[in-house]
Image: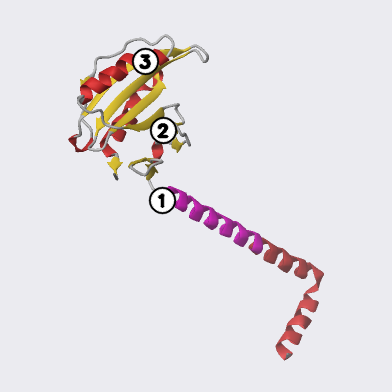
Amino acid sequence: MIFFEDLLYKIQLMGKKWIFIILFIIFFVLIVLAEVTRSVKTEIKTNIVEKKDPFQTYESADGSFSLTLKTDYNLEKIENDKYILDLVSDKNLNIFIDKQPLVEGKSLEEVINVDKRDYPGQFNGFTNVSETSGIKVKNDLPAFTYSFEYFDANISQGFMVQIVWVQTNTGYYIFNMDFPKETLDESLVIINDILSVFEFSE
């Protein structure tokens, strides 16, 4: 008690001027501490964001199929009852994946040629339908592909479509990739990645 009484007496002797100076110093120190705390919190949040998982897994609606792709591709999963998996990127790359039962007595090439004959006709003004060709995919599964172009008059933009059929023991997986022609190079990077990383859990 004697210490505090002596301290109070000394403060009173210092006068109001010194009291204001001391209060200003305390206030300044509090501001500095608050700013340092805010900076530390911001750095922690930044580190958490930077350490996010560089890959994301997308699973099909029926659980038979999944893709683990780079988050940098900025793909979003869309709920769509027509396909087992529907993904879209911020660059307007659409990836539709479907599954069909095996056709007895028909080779995969014969089956995809029927698809090539019929499917492009669903697009107005389709052009440049390619030949059907074999393609290498994960696990060296039987796979064939073809492509074509079409023009969407509603938005005055040209698109490319690449179709890939992959045969497994239980059926066909059909990869339907639709993207603007001007994004050809970057879209093909994603498509090639898809065809090399997919997983089946049949």
3 or 2: tag closer to the N-terminus: 2
Which residue sits at x=34%, y=15%? Answer: 118
Find residue 162 and report its horizontal and vertical position in percent: 33, 22
Instruction: Please state if 130 lies on the left or on the right of 182 as rendered.
Output: left
Residues packed near mark 1 inside 10 Å, few (<14), some (14 to 19) or many (20 plus):
few
Residue 51 part of the magenta segment: yes
Residue sitting nearer the eye, 174 or 139: 174
Which residue sits at x=45%, y=37%? Answer: 77
Which residue sits at x=45%, y=26%? Answer: 92
What residue would you read off at disc 2?
Answer: 83
Range of magenta residues? 30-52
Residues packed near mark 2 inside 10 Å, few (<14), some (14 to 19) or many (20 plus):
some
- The three-letter amino acid code for the residue at tag 3 is Pro
Residue 160 part of the magenta segment: no
1 or 3: tag closer to the N-terminus: 1
Q: CA distance from mark 1 to mark 3?
A: 43 Å
Find residue 85 and report its horizontal and vertical position in percent: 40, 36
Is residue 96 something that shows in the picture?
A: yes
What residue would you read off at disc 1?
Answer: 51
Locate the C terminus and report the quarter of the image it occupies. top left
What residue would you read off at disc 3?
Answer: 120
Mark sitting on residue 146: none
Residue sitting nearer the eye, 78 or 160: 78
Picture layout, residue 90 above or below residue 146: below
Q: How is the image coloured?
A: secondary structure
